[in-house]
Each structure stands twice: as structure tokens, then as C-alpha cells.
Amino acid sequence: MSLNKYVISTIVGVAISLSVFATFSLIDQVYAAKYPYKGQLSGDNEVPPVQTKATGEADFTKPANDTIKYRVNVTGLSNATMAHIHSGAQGKNGAPVVDLLNPSTSKDKDTAYGMIIRGNITSSSLTGALQGKTLDDLAAMMDSGEAYVNVHTADHKDGEIRGQINNEDKAKATSNSTVGFSTLTE
């Protein structure tokens, strides 16, 4: 009888462990699919590099065909004057193609820990080389590694922190959408 209890306890324990593992694995997959495009921002990524303690992370998702949602979290930086998506490969500077922060119209605010910039990109948001183009063109730029996020300050007008936009899991994301973004709704 004691052996049967041991076997049953072991089976139940393994089943619970597998269930917990599967749940966390699913959560990780949903989060990765929700924000498959990311950029890690730092002064070292600027061209030329900038001495700063500021860092940040940018996340992009595509919940609808006509909108890209973004969130940029920045720490150690205050008084951002602008934030953009620029065209350009790593190590190269390029022109802005999307305005992410305009302090005169922005509802984003400095927080005790930094700044959170968030919003939506539509085809009418595209500027510069992408003006008049579609979100598919922006997605193609991101897929090819030719786009980066740049946050500008009064002290560093050309940019204080920068991060190349990368697809965290291109194969998974492109299987869900024709432009490489998740189609999950929020």
C-alpha cells in the first residue's frame, strides 16, 4: 500500500510540475508574440557613443492591420525633447521616419523612475523616406535591421540613447502575420 501511495504522489507531483512549466512557457510565448519587436537603448549605441547612465527599452506590437502600438520605457533620463524611429543600420545614422514623442502635444510624462512614451503608429504617422508609404514598409525596415529608436535631450540634441529595433522571434511572429507582427488584441 505504501508503494502505491508513493507512486501516486510521484505521478501527481510530476503532473503538477509539468502543468506549471507549460503555463509559464505559454505566458512567455504570448509575451514574446505580443512584443516581438524590441530595442535596447543606451548611450553606447549612439553614433558617436554618448556618456550617459540613461537606458531604455522599446516594444512594438501590431494588434490591427492599420496600427502599430509602441511603448518606450526610459530610466536615468529627464527632459526628453524628442523620440523617433530613424532609418539606419547599426552604427549608421539616419533620418527620422516616425515621431514617437512631441513634448508640445504629448500626454506622456516623466515618472519617478524615468519616462514612459507610448502611442500608436498609423500610415499617416510616417515621415521622411516613409511618408506616403504603408506600415508594411515600416515593418520591412524593422525586419531588415534598418530601423532604430532614438531619444533626444537638450544636452544631446542628436540623441542621448539609441537602440536598434530587432525581431525577438522572427519565425514565430511572421507565422502569425504577413508583416511580422503579432495579431493579438490587447
Image (spheres, rainbow, N blue to C red):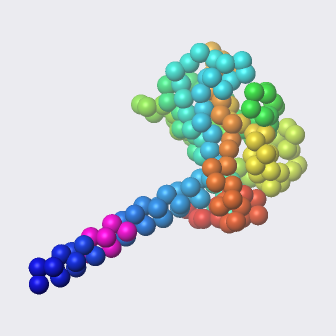
Q: Position of residue 51 (x, y in %)?
A: 59, 15
Q: Position of residue 88 (x, y in %)?
A: 80, 34
The reply to whether residue 171 is visible in this rendering is yes
Query: Residue lying farthest bottom?
Result: 1
Q: Position of residue 22 (x, y in %)?
A: 43, 67
Q: Observer-nearest residue: 50 or 98?
A: 50
Q: Position of residue 60 (x, y in %)?
A: 63, 49
Magenta-span inclusion, residue 63? no
How many numbered markers are drawn?
Answer: 0
Picture residue at 62% right of the left edge, 26% below the top = 161
Quadrant of the image occupied by residue 101:
top right
Picture residue at 76% right of the left edge, 59% below the top = 179
Q: Which residues are magenta?
A: 12-18
Query: Residue lying farthest left?
Result: 2
132 shown above or below 40: below
Q: Observer-nearest residue: 166 or 117?
A: 166
User: Which part of the image, by quadrant, shows the N terminus?
Assistant: bottom left
Quadrant of the image occupied by residue 38:
top right
Magenta-span inclusion, residue 15? yes
Compared across the picture, whether 19 is left or right of 109 comes to: left
Which SS does the magenta portion mostly show?
A: helix
76 shown above or below 178: above
The reply to whether residue 70 is visible in this rendering is no
Q: Observer-nearest residue: 82 or 9?
A: 9
Picture residue at 56% right of the left edge, 55% below the top = 32
Picture residue at 22% right of the left edge, 79% below the top = 8
Compared across the picture, whether 156 is left or right of 90 comes to: left
Compared across the picture, whether 134 is left or right of 2 comes to: right
38 shown above or below 94: below
